[in-house]
Amino acid sequence: MTEIGAIPVFVAVAENQGFAAAARKLGITKSAVSKRISALEAHLGVQLFHRSTRSISLTEAGETYLEHAVHALGYAQEAENAVAALQGEPVGHLKLSVPMSFGQLHVAPAVGEFLKTYPSLSVELVMDDRFIDLVESGLDLALRAGTLPDSALIAKKLAPIHSVIVASPDYLKRFDAPQTPQDLLEHDCLHYSYSRDPLEWKFLGEDGAVTVRTKGRFQVNNSEALCTTIIDGVGIGRLPTFIAGAHLAEGRLQRILPDYPMPEQALFAVFPERRHIPAKVRAFVDFFASHVGQGSPYWDKEAGLVADDGKTTN
C-alpha cells in the first residue's frame, strides 16, 4: 500500500498515452511522473508499460492493474463526494461535455455566471457532437439532446427540444413556400449529417404522423454551418429552435409549415451512476435548468413557439 498515491499518476499516463501528456494533465513535471511510475513498478515487481522513444503501451500486467486502479479512483471519488455533500458547498473541478453548437450558443455564455456563483469550482468544457464515453473520458457530466441509448448512465430532463422547418426571406421570394410536408419534395432541402437519418423528416399533422424523405445537394455535420447556409438562401432546412430562435426573432429566417410541428425531443443532463452525486454536478444541473427555463426554454420564446402567457404554440 506504500505506493497508493501513484495510482492517479498511473491512470493519467495510461489514459493520456504518455508521460508528458499525463504531466500536463496533473500539473506536475514529466520527471515527477516518471519517478512515480518507476517507484510503483518497483513496489509491484512488474513492468506496467512498454516504453519506446515514440510511444508507450500497457503490458498485460498494466492492463490488469489499470482495471482495478480505475475502480479504486472511483471509490476514492465516492468518498470525497460523500464528505462534500455534508459540507454543502460545491468544490473542485467539473469536466462537462456538450454538443458543439449548443455549447457555443448556450452553455459557454452561462459559464461565467456559474463560476461567479460557485467560486470554489473550476470548469473544463469539452465541446463535441460525437457521443463520448463519460467514464473513459473522466467526465462528470454531459448535456445531450434527442433520444438516449440504453445505458447505466443517470439522465435528467432539463428542457424540451423542438425543431422547425425554416428558409431565408430571399429563398421564399424566389420559390413558393411549401404548404404541406409533401411539397418539400419540390425543394432543395439542406441536411444535418449527424442526424439518425438526415433525409427523413417527421411531422405531426391533424390526421397523424407524416414522414417525408427529402432530397437536397448539401449536408454538414455542424448545425451553425447548416443555419448559415439556410440564411444564405441555398435551400430549406430543419433546425432546432436553440439554433434558429434568434434568427427567427430578428427576421433572418422564416418558419415554414407551422401547422405541421415536428415531434418533441429533450435536452438531458447525463452523468455516471454513483451512490453520491457530486455536489458540483448537482449545482450545475440545477443552475442550468433554471438558466434556460425548464418548461419553456428562452430559445423557444425567441422562435415564437411560446406565447406571452407561457403556453406552447405549434
Image (tube, rainbow, N blue to C red):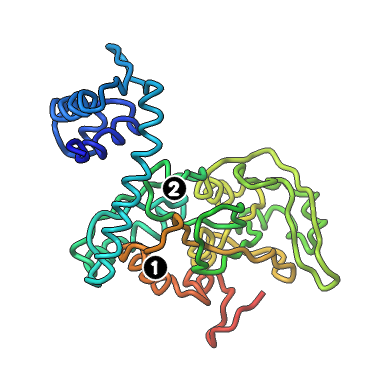
Earlier-in-chain disc, 2 versus 1: 2
Give the image quarter of residue 44: top left
Label 2: element kind: loop
Crowdedness near tag 2: few (<14), some (14–19) or many (≥20) residues, C-alpha within 10 Å: some
Pointer 2 residue: 134
Crowdedness near tag 1: few (<14), some (14–19) or many (≥20) residues, C-alpha within 10 Å: some
Q: Where is residue 283 in the image (x, y as percent from the top left)?
A: 33, 68
Q: Is residue 196 above or below residue 254?
A: above
Q: Position of residue 63 (x, y in %)?
A: 40, 28
Q: Where is residue 111 in the image (x, y as percent from the top left)?
A: 30, 60
* Residue kind at label 2, given as amino acid type: Leu
Instruction: In this rendered view, identify the residue nearer to me: 179 or 90.
Output: 90
* Residue kind at label 1, given as amino acid type: Phe
- Kindly identify which numbered label has been placed on residue 88: none
- Kindly identify which numbered label has been placed on residue 288: 1
Q: Is residue 228 above or below residue 83?
A: above
Label 1: element kind: helix
Q: In screen coordinates, is 196 left or right of 310?
A: right
Q: In screen coordinates, is 173 left or right of 24?
A: right
Q: Where is residue 179 in the image (x, y as percent from the top left)?
A: 78, 64
Task: Please state the total of marks drawn on the protein image.
Answer: 2
Kindly indicate whether the residue at mark 1 contacts the one at mark 2 (C-beta within 8 angstroms). Answer: no
Instruction: In this rendered view, identify the residue nearer to me: 216 or 112.
Output: 112
Q: In screen coordinates, is 209 left or right of 217?
A: right
What is the quadrant of the N terminus in the image?
top left
